Amino acid sequence: MVTLERMWTESFRPRNLDEVVGQTEIVERLKQFVRRVDFPHMLFSGPPGVGKTTCAEAIVNEIYPPSERSSNVKRLNASDDRGINVVRQDIKNFARIIPSGSSSYKIIILDEADQMTSDAQHALRQTMERYNEITRFILICNYSSRIISPIQSRCAIFRFTGLSIDDIKSRLKYIAKKKQLQIDEEALNALYESSEGDLRQAINALQASASLTPEITVEVVYKVQGYVKPTEVRAAIMECLGSQPNFSAARKHIQILMESYGLSGQDLVKHLNRELGKMPEDEIPESVRFSALSMLSEVDYRIATGSNPQVQLDAFLAKMISVAQKQV
């Protein structure tokens, strides 16, 4: 019988607030709530993979003994359970029951709360208000703007920020050491870049890389991630700049990237956007950069609404050459 290894994102998930990576100010505020053994409803917002769910689980671990967690904690993912019936049945039925054991209140963790319908959010607001004495809510979302104002006003709001490259690399080094992996600095940088600051994604990529070899190099990371090397994207851009631009060469670079890496048009737009933002001014004048980024946003919109990606990317390259030629 084959035994599957546990996901590293779970194996190395912090179990208490002291172990949480980054988010120093937020962690300190949460520790104060835990020490007081009481807290208001809370709303955690921010990009994925920065510690929102981890902090919620750490709070649960610090407040309840293991024997009381299952009866006093309910976890729901609002992207699956997003309708009003879930609030009126599952959530309300759990919220109204008196806490068990020594606890004075229960906790409902509602992940991806910004995916809930407006009607469901209004029903949730009523439940939060009615059972406030015995139930606390921890709402987790990417965009707090999608949470209705009446709910926000009833919560202490914690805005999580993207993790720094040092925080992510430090955690990856820790995991690599525990798993007896050899990983160089260039590979760590590639894991950070390819994950776009999402620690969960970076850890998954590290585990995928380790399944191939215990010696993690940048080439291994690129291979398992299907990640486009920045130099390859930049090569396409550079063909459009200078006194002798080459549209055919730039177009060929783009086609090779899409075919070799299986990129969609929007994937490629994302890579082009990243490189245009990072290129130094001695390679691309600021006026050209600004025009190119503006045009790229239009390309992204058109592809998203159904336009042909190749046609839109060809038009982008042609326009960038035209703008760059005016600067010569």
Image (cartoon, rainbow, N blue to C red):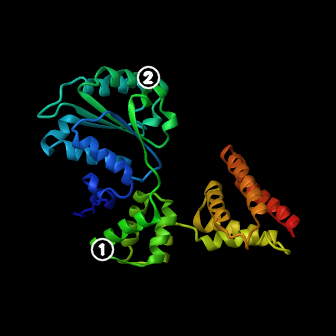
- Residue 211 appears in view: no
- Residue 312 appears in view: yes
Left/right of residue 75 with respect to residue 230 in the rendered view: left
Left/right of residue 316 with respect to residue 155 in the rendered view: right
- Type of the residue with mark 2: His
Q: Nearer the viewer, residue 137 or 301?
A: 137
- The x and y percentages for residue 163 are 44, 58
- The x and y percentages for residue 95 are 26, 26
- Contact, mark 1 vs mark 2 (Cβ under 8 Å): no
Q: Secondary structure at mark 2?
A: helix
Please tell me how many numbered marks the rendered image carries: 2
Question: If the image is split into quadrants, where does the C terminus sit?
Answer: bottom right
- Type of the residue with mark 1: Lys
- Label 2: how many residues lie within 10 Å, few (<14), some (14-19) or many (20+)? some
Identify the image quadrant of residue 100. top left
Identify the image quadrant of residue 84. top left
Q: Residue tagged by mark 2?
A: 122
Q: Which mark is residue 66?
A: none
- The x and y percentages for residue 76 are 33, 37
Q: Nearer the viewer, residue 130 or 266?
A: 130
Q: Nearer the viewer, residue 47 or 258?
A: 47
- The x and y percentages for residue 264 are 62, 57
Would you place residue 124 above or below residue 189 in this image?
above
Mark pair 1, 2: CA separation: 48 Å
Q: Residue at x 65, y 69 (%)?
A: 233
Q: Nearer the viewer, residue 115 or 173?
A: 173
Q: Residue at x 51, y 64 (%)?
A: 194
Question: If the image is split into quadrants, where does the N terminus sit?
Answer: bottom left
Q: Residue tagged by mark 1?
A: 177
Q: Closer to the N terminus: mark 1 or mark 2?
A: 2
